Image (cartoon, grey):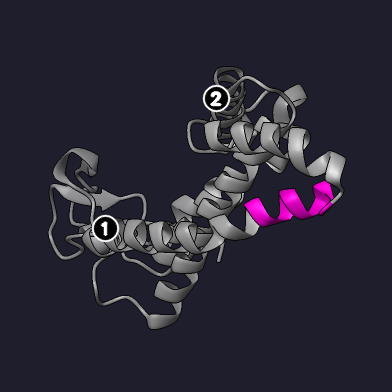
Amino acid sequence: MPKFVVQRSLYEVRETPSRVYSWQVFVLSHIVVEIPWQILVGVCCYASFYYPVFGVNTPSGSKGLVLLFVVQFYVYAASMAQMVIASNNDPLLGAILAIFMFALSFIFSGVLQPPSALPGFWIFMYNVSPFTYYVGGISGTALRGRQVICSQAELSVFNPPTDYTCGQYMGPYLQVAPGKLNNPDVMSGCEYCSISYADQNLSAREISY
C-alpha cells in the first residue's frame, strides 16, 4: 500500500501531464506485477499447511484444486488491497479499511456461525464474502469422503434393552440416520458416533464438493 501511494503521486505529478500512458495502464501494471509474487507466496503457504493438515495420501485432483484456491486467494488479497488504497491517499487509513473489510468477510463466511444462524439482514454478507467460497472450497475438496473417528468425549454411550445387542437395538435407527456404531456385538456400553463421514458435518454448513 505505501509503495502504491508513492508511485501514484509520482504518476500524477510527472506522467499525467506528459500523457505518456493512461491511468488504466498504471493500475493494470500494479496488478500484473503482483501476480507472480502472490503465486509464489500462495504455493509456499499451500505447502506449509496442506500436507501437515490433510496428509500426502489425498487424491492428486484435490491437491491441485486446493492449490488453485490458495493462489487465487492471495491474488485476490493483493488486488483488494490496491483497490482500497486507490480510493484514498493515506496508507494508514487504507490499512484500517482493509482490516475492517477482512473482519466482515471472515465473521460472515460461515466459519464462526453456520448460515442458518446468521441474522436475516446479514445473510447477504455470507453470499458476497470471498471467505465463504474460499473456506467452503478447500473444506469440501479436501475433506469429502473422509471417515470421522469420534474421540471418547464425543461418543454417546448407552445400554440397549435386555437380551439385545447394540447392533440389534440400533439397526433400524442406523438405516435412516447418519452415524456409526463402534461395538454392534456387545450387550452393554454401546458407543455411538453421530457422524461417520465429514460430508455430513459439511452439509450442515451448506458446504459440498
In the picture provided, is 128 more to the left or to the right than 90?
A: right
Residue drawn at (17%, 61%) of the image: 183
The image shows residue 169, relative to residue 89, as above or below, that is below
Q: Distance between the residues labelled 2 and 1?
A: 26 Å
Residue drawn at (71%, 42%) of the image: 127
Residue 200 highlighted magenta (yes or no):
no
Closer-to-camera residue (141/20) = 20
The image shows residue 64, relative to residue 96, as above or below, that is below
Q: Dividing the picture into quarters, in which one does residue 12 lie?
A: top right
Rendering coords of residue 109 (x, y %): 58, 38
Residue that mark 2 sits on: 95
In the picture provided, is 83 more to the left or to the right than 110?
A: right
Magenta highlight range: 20-30
In the picture provided, is 194 more to the left or to the right than 75?
A: left
The secondary structure that dominates the magenta segment is helix
Residue that mark 1 sits on: 48
Please tell me how crowded label 2 is: few (under 14), some (14-19), or many (20+) other residues with Cα within 10 Å.
Answer: some
